[in-house]
Image: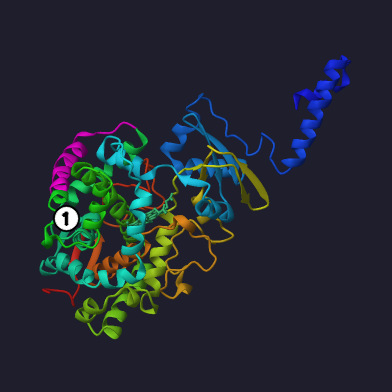
Amino acid sequence: MSSLLVIGHRVPFKGRVSLALVVIVYAASALIFRRKPSSSFPPLVPSALPWVGSALSFLSNPRGFLARCHKRYGPVFKLLLGGREVVVVSSAAAISSIYASEDAAPHAMHDQIFRAFIGRSPKHTEFNVEKEIFPLLDQVFSKRALEVLTQPLARMVFARIKHHTRIQSAQLSLMTFLAEPLYFTVNVMLFGNGYPSDSFDDFRIIDESMPERFLGSPYWFLPSVQARGRLLPRGIDYVKKIHIPENNSALGSDFIQTLQSNGVSPEEAACHLLTFTWGLHANTQGAIFWLFLFLLSDPVALTAVRDEIDRAIEHEFGDLHGFLVDANLKNLDGPYFTLLTSAIMEAMRLTATFMGIRVANSDFELRNSDTIISVRKGEHLLGNVDALHMDESVYPNSRAFVYDRFAYCEGKFRMDGKPWFSFAAGRHLCKGRYLAMYELKISAILSLYLFDITPVGGPPPPWWPPRAQKANLGFPRIENIIVQLHPRDHAEGR
Ligand code: HEM
């Protein structure tokens, strides 16, 4: 552009030739790339710190910071985050096309989680998780395979919580009450009896430190290092004994064999498996925890969802025993649990709004409402799912938990054109979505049917929106909540 500004001055002949050339080249490129935005688009969010850019504001409160930028700069803007410019988009079309695109790959997600969970980089092998392990996940987590695999899950979860029905009243951590039975049973189901499935407390300690580990911020590392020190040798032991026939597992042996046939040592294979278990459990734990926080703060929602569960168990399944036998994927994904499904989707609409940063592996064009953004190879991209889930024109009263907002789905987990990205979309649609929905429903049904659950210490504080935003890696983190459990009349002494 600056070359064209010299046109009004006297220019020597040689200069005039080169100027003409510049004009021709400029005109030609303007024609070829006529949809290319000017360099001021997308606008770059200003920041005082060179290289670091907006990283501190972004990491300390990603939602709040993105919301402020969205308000100020509109639906497309750029952030400088630790030396890289990240293009942030907020329309459903743009976010869908990032998820769908072959050109925008998640940036070595497994390796990053490995580094955070294990505390070092994976050792170099030819092995690529997405290429080798994802096809296995597609098989094991397909709806059809899960129909069979999850048959005993409701009974196993019940076996894990029924001792609470024999005690008049108990106080315990809400997270442990909801998530431990799922952690244990899903591990047994996928990895067999040889897996250290009783490691919930260590898993939680490590998970608590994951955002700081992932983002490289300071944290109190000793408890999580000790927890990992206990978990890792047990994982290695499991891998070494994987060939024992009693270790019959739906995923564990294939997972380990795939790694070992790619030259990965047993120690390293155990690290990959433990990294995978973080993805398997952490988000489901966040989802069930937040579902209950919303229900416990909303008596109308709690009563409506519980009434639906009582009705279904007593009228459709006969009794709890009938439910435990028939709690298959199909029966839970249907009209008996319309309000429960809606409440889960609504809790996730508000809290599961994360997307990993993508890297463009070639030049391509991204459609964002009525603009086209030219993305260049190597550029980073981020979908602002939160902005979309909070769009008042799509979700009126968008900041509130409206438990029956998705009741039109009639129990099925479906979007009907609504922008709902809690399980991602397109080719990166979450591979564990059917399992996660099933786990969430089993846990909610059994907990609400069997127990009255009240937060200890009087009426609950407003948990939503979380006041002190901690850095998070997925669901918003808040302090643990202690609840009082009372077995309901039909549950006592089971
Ligand atoms: C409520 C629980 C869960 C939520 C909210 C959730 C959400 C998501 C989201 C948003 C993504 C896309 C991330 C991105 O590409 O940036 C994703 C991907 C993925 N999820 Fe989940 N997830 C959940 C449970 C699970 C479970 C139980 C598994 C079981 C293994 C799982 C396995 C995966 C895998 C393998 C991917 C990568 C897919 C790909 O890149 O093609 N997720 N999940």
Question: From the viewer's perspective, is 383 left or right of 196?
Answer: right
Looking at the picture, does residue 479 appear above or below residue 178?
Answer: above
Residue in the foreground of this view, choosing between 485 and 58: 58
Write down the quadrant of residue 113 in the picture.
Answer: top left
Residue lying at 17% horizontally and 74% vertically, measured from the top left: 491
Residue 494: where, in percent of width, then height? 12, 74
| Left or right: where 391 falls relative to 484 | right
Q: Which residues are magenta?
A: 217-237
Which residue is disc 1 drawn over? 197
Asked if residue 108 is positioned above or below residue 15 in the image, the reply reads below
Q: Residue at x 19, y 52 (%)?
A: 200
Say which element carries label 1: loop
Secondary structure mostly seen in magenta is helix
Of residues 345 and 236, the one drawn nearer to the viewer in this rendering: 236
x and y, in percent, of residue 448 in the image: 26, 69
Name the quarter showing ligand 1. bottom left
Magenta region includes residue 218: yes
